[in-house]
Structure formats: C-alpha cells, structure tokens
Image (cartoon, rainbow, N blue to C red):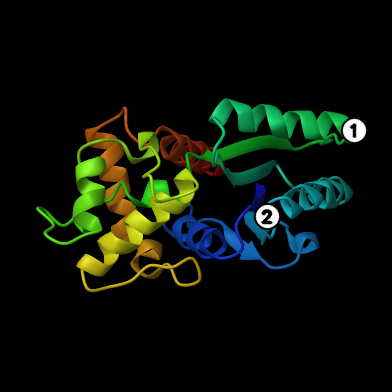
Amino acid sequence: MNLYFLVEGTHSERKIYPAWLDYLLPELQRVYNYYDANVKNYYLISGQGYPSFYNFITTSVQEINSTGKYNYFVLCLDADENTVSERHAEINDFLTNQKLELKKTELVLIVQNRCLESWLLGNRKIYTKNPQDPPLLDYTKYYDVSVNCPENMGKYPDFNTHAQFHAAYLRKLFEAKNTSYSKKDPGDARKEFYLNQLLERIKAHPEHLITFRYFIEFCNKIKVELQN
C-alpha cells in the first residue's frame, strides 16, 4: 500500500497533512523521493499553488505510472470561489484534455471547502466566547463558526475571497488564545489535540465540515486496507 499526495498549497498543507497522517495512519512511513516507495509508504509534495499545481499533476501522473507502486493518487486542493463539484469537474477535464491516465492507481480528490483554514475553524476549543474587540467581534456577529459550519461561511465585505476571510478569522481566533497561526507556521493546528477537536466536531455534528469528513473517511478506508 503506497499513497502519492499532491497538495496545492506551498506552506500549511505541506506541514499539516504529514502531521495529521502520523496520527491517522501511523502505519505509513513517509518517503522523500517518489521512487523510494516500497511497502506502506506515502510521498507528499506541494504543487506550489495555483496555477502551477496543474503542471505538477502532469509530472505526478508520469511518476506514478513509471513506478507502478502507488495504489492512490491523492490531490488536495482548495475550492476557493468555486463549488466542490466544479473543482472535481475542473480536475477531470484537465486529465482528459491532457490525455493523462493512471494505469494502476486510483485518483482521490480532497477538495477543501473553501480552504484548509475553513477546516481548522471547526475546532470549537479555539473559539473565544463573547469576544469584545474588533475585528473578531465583527467576524463573530457576521458568522459564528462555533455554532455554524465553517465550510458554509460567506465572505466578509472587507475581503476579496472567501479563503482570505476564513484565514483572517482563524488568525484572530488564535491571537485571542495568545498563540498564532500562519501558513508558514501553522502552530497548534499540526498537533493531535487540534485534529481530535475536528474529529469531535464531525462526530457531534455530522452535517458540518463535509469535505473534512471525506478526508477522514478516506484515511479510515486506508487503515482497513492496511490491516487486510
């Protein structure tokens, strides 16, 4: 069993996914060259953001087919201003138009709706009850992520994109807890207790964080396959 991960982001995804995989799939060992995969390994690289991510897809398919060792090709990307289904269609159209075909490997699309920070907003333990100061007070009045699903949150008027707002909201929640979050240094977001809070959120509210749940269900599927 080997997995090949291509994550869109240049910083946070590249740090958070390996940390979470250590907790969720400790049976897998990371390799740092795609050709080193043997048994129970995963390889993870960054697509260096949009649009270079698509160039990496082409290279990744070629590498996967050349080794014949990977069971799954996992693409992790943001929905951004699109819907999840639109992102799926976009990837599938790209593969078709570029005549890219995986020989023995299953494609798995993990679309973060709207972005990885949207998932991270699901940790209710980082939420400061009754914030008193702007902009966190304003953000909370606009949309309370401790109650409502962060993936469904809109775009605050001061921001150009949903992802920008979701990331700003997350940073302010961290600051209110006297800690910090940035894409270059995700801090506590990499830790097991943080992941466990997200797992508690989807357990208590199955209708929340649907795309995060899909990632977790995929990991659970892999865990079962590793045991067989």
The residue that appears at 40% across and 46% down in the rendered structure is 118
Amino acid tagged 2? Val
Quadrant of residue 133 within the rendered picture:
bottom left
Q: Secondary structure at mark 1?
A: loop
Residue at the disc numbered 2: 39
Give whichever of 175, 91 is nearer the camera: 175
Q: Is residue 136 above or below residue 86?
A: below
Q: Is residue 126 above or below residue 161?
A: below
Please give the label number shown on residue 99. Answer: 1
- Which numbered disc, 2 or 1, marks the residue closer to the eye? 1
Please give the label number shown on residue 152. Answer: none
Quadrant of residue 89 within the rendered picture:
top right
Asked whether residue 228 appears in the rendered view, the answer is no
Is residue 92 rendered to the left or right of residue 28?
Answer: right
Q: Is residue 150 above or below residue 97?
A: below
Residue 105 percent coordinates (x, y): 75, 38
Q: Secondary structure at mark 2?
A: loop
